[in-house]
Amino acid sequence: MGTEQEEDEEDYMPGDNYYATVNAFIKYEEEFNTITSGSIDTHVPGANCDEINKTHITDNDFTGRCHRVAKYLHYIKDKEDIENRCKCLNYLLNTKIEYNTFPKKKCSELFDAYEAISDNLKTCKLTIGCINKVDLEQIKNIYYLNEAIKKLEKSIEDNDENTYSTAEEFAQLYTNSIGGCKSDNTKSYCGAIRDLEVLCYHHFTPFVSWFNNYMMNNKIIRPNINEEVTNGIFEHTNETKGRNSTYSLSYIGYPAT
């Protein structure tokens, strides 16, 4: 038997295979919240929550939680994109306070109960588990960045007067997330962050020059990032949306340097 630290490390599963799929989590979190809301009186056949409660938790307070997780597992059992749905579920179990803690239970003990639910329902069997803490923080960073991108997209679509501050909010999140990445690191977590760097130009084309300037001034992106691609995207945007976009450079303005 290893040391206590080694045993604790063995209790966690790696999360580096989540980085490329986090962009799907927002819609699946909404799905999870919808499916698990409301009454939990209806028991999912085969989940055996009462037995799991007796075997793993020995506390009736876990029963409702078990029924909610079972309800979602039952819902996604025959759905498409099951792998990303399972990863999203495990991410939510690891991050939502109402699921990731239980009195007098370590993470591994709590997730033994969640694994038992997935085993009984034969869904997400190899996905449920405690995610390595460092990996989990990085997954959360990518999640929040994707969330910020969607928020900015909606702000543009709605002609929201707060678009500039929303863009700055995203830029600050990006700054915080990429801090430990070297400029030539395009693998794993840093690679996922770099991918968002390019994605910005596809999502924020109505004011791509402003965004490029802002990101460079704050040392968030490299000055020489694929300028040809950026210009091409900007031209395409002007052709399809017109040059009188509400979010022209004159409206957005430039950040102070």
Image (cartoon, rainbow, N blue to C red):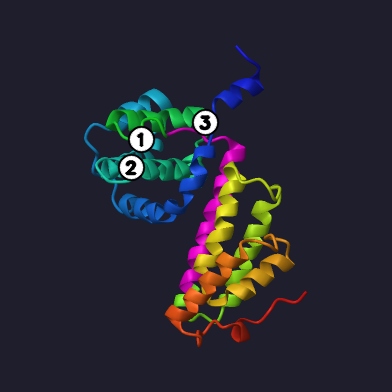
Name the foreground residue: 190 vs 139.
Answer: 190
Whether the magenta-drawn stretch holds residue 140 is answered as: yes
Q: Which residues are magenta?
A: 128-154
Q: Which label was assigned to residue 13?
A: 3
Look at 67% across and 66% down and name the residue there: 215
Residue extending furthest toward the right? 257
Please count the marks in the image.
Answer: 3
Q: Would you say residue 136 sits in the magenta stretch?
A: yes
**Residue type at numbered disc 3:** Met
If the image is split into quadrants, where does the C terminus sit?
Answer: bottom right
Give neighbour class at mark 3: few <14, some 14-19, many 20+ (Cα, 10 Å): some
Q: Position of residue 50 (x, y in %)?
A: 31, 30
Residue, disc 1: 124
Q: Residue at x 60, y 21 (%)?
A: 7
* In the foreground, 112 or 165: 165
Q: Amino acid at mark 2?
A: Ile
Q: Kindly state the secondary structure of the residue where label 2 is placed.
A: helix
Query: Can the viewer see residue 83 in this picture?
Result: yes
Tag 2–tag 1 contact (CB < 8 Å):
yes
